[in-house]
Amino acid sequence: MNALKFTVSAFALAAAAGAANAREQVQVAGSSTVLPYAAIVAEAFGENFEFPTPVVEGGGSGAGRKKLCEGVGENTIDVANSSSRIKQSDIDLCTQNGVTEIMEVRIGYDGIVFASDINGAEFAFTPADWYNALAAEVMKDGALVPNAAKTWADVNPALPAQDILAFIPGTKHGTREVFDVKVLEEGCKASGAEEAFIAAKGEEDGKKACLALRTDGVSVDIDGDYTETLARIAANKNGIGVFGLSFYQNNTDKLQVATMDGVTPSVETISSGDYPVSRPLYFYVKKAHLGVIPGLKEYIEFFVSDDMAGPDGPLAEYGLVSDPELAATQAAVAAETPMGPLE
């Protein structure tokens, strides 16, 4: 396609058209991180193909994968967007409900950033800072103790003496899974708490203990999307929120971003692997619906085309870090290759 038409507003979500002829349209649900990318693709698809604009809804990565696995048929969705990789429990649910072949499609990469009010103090974090701020128990004088830190300076004297208030993704979001692994677990290790937990509880329970958070109001789960986190920061100027890079980049008039391990998040630092808190983004396709739901194959091919997902496409312009292996993804989609067992 040499001359794509674009009259796309970034959040022109097809969810608003949900009442339209349901199964003449591709139906997509899931990750709030992937949502704006899918919305851009869906609207451009509707403008450039002889198919209706796909219906794109949010709800979170886990919820989207669960909906994908409800079964096969016109009353079930075709595509689940996800900011974390599918789990074996999802695959087992799919199998139980007759969804036996799933295509895994990686669309690119995104970073998880830590941002606060643009007029507030500047922050330079490490994963250990976040663990020591939010964990239920932390190391002090060589022993695990209940976390009593009130300000970020209590956690690390190099940080501002600002009250700790963190708005983090709720557990249904794929972003939370990555936050848990790349921030809390890494911080738990770096602080020495993981070793102490394992000594006290054993390997499995010790590692789980790293994810136990304070319940005194300093750590607030956000079950909505990033716009809710932004609103919370607007109302609580001491708040620091967890966002996807692309959302931050589109709100730099309201937010300032912190460094992590001395690296500022950007498309360049994520592409190079220097920024430590990044992750691939995916969507999952119910293969049984290919050839049945009009436009489904064309939509997924269009999504990963150079025109959309390439380094010069509109998704990169919005903030997606283009996948250097995009050509291999395009070939797998064209061949309708289902995913194999999880490694």
Image: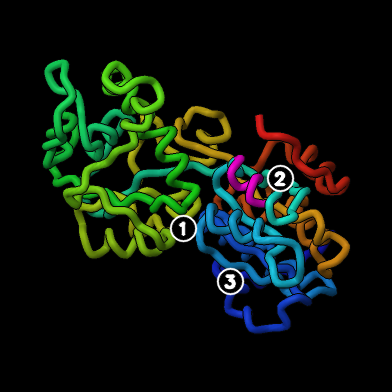
Query: Is residue 93 highlighted in magenta?
Result: yes
The quarter of the rendered structure image containing the C terminus is: top right
Are there few (<14), some (14-19), or many (20+) residues within 10 Å of tag 2?
many
- Residue in the image at 71% along x and 78% along y: 22
Q: Find disc 2 in the rendering and name its residue.
A: 104
Look at the magenta stretch and give its main secondary structure.
helix
Q: How many marks?
A: 3
Above or below residue 225? Residue 281 is above
- Is 48 positioned to the left or the right of 63 in the image? right
Q: Find disc 3 in the rendering and name its residue.
A: 13
Q: Earlier in the sequence, mark 1 or mark 2?
A: 2
Element on which disc 1 rests? loop
The three-letter amino acid code for the residue at tag 2 is: Glu
Instruction: Report the magenta residues as a range.
Output: 88-94
Q: Position of residue 201 (x, y in %)?
A: 30, 23
Q: Position of residue 219 (x, y in %)?
A: 25, 48
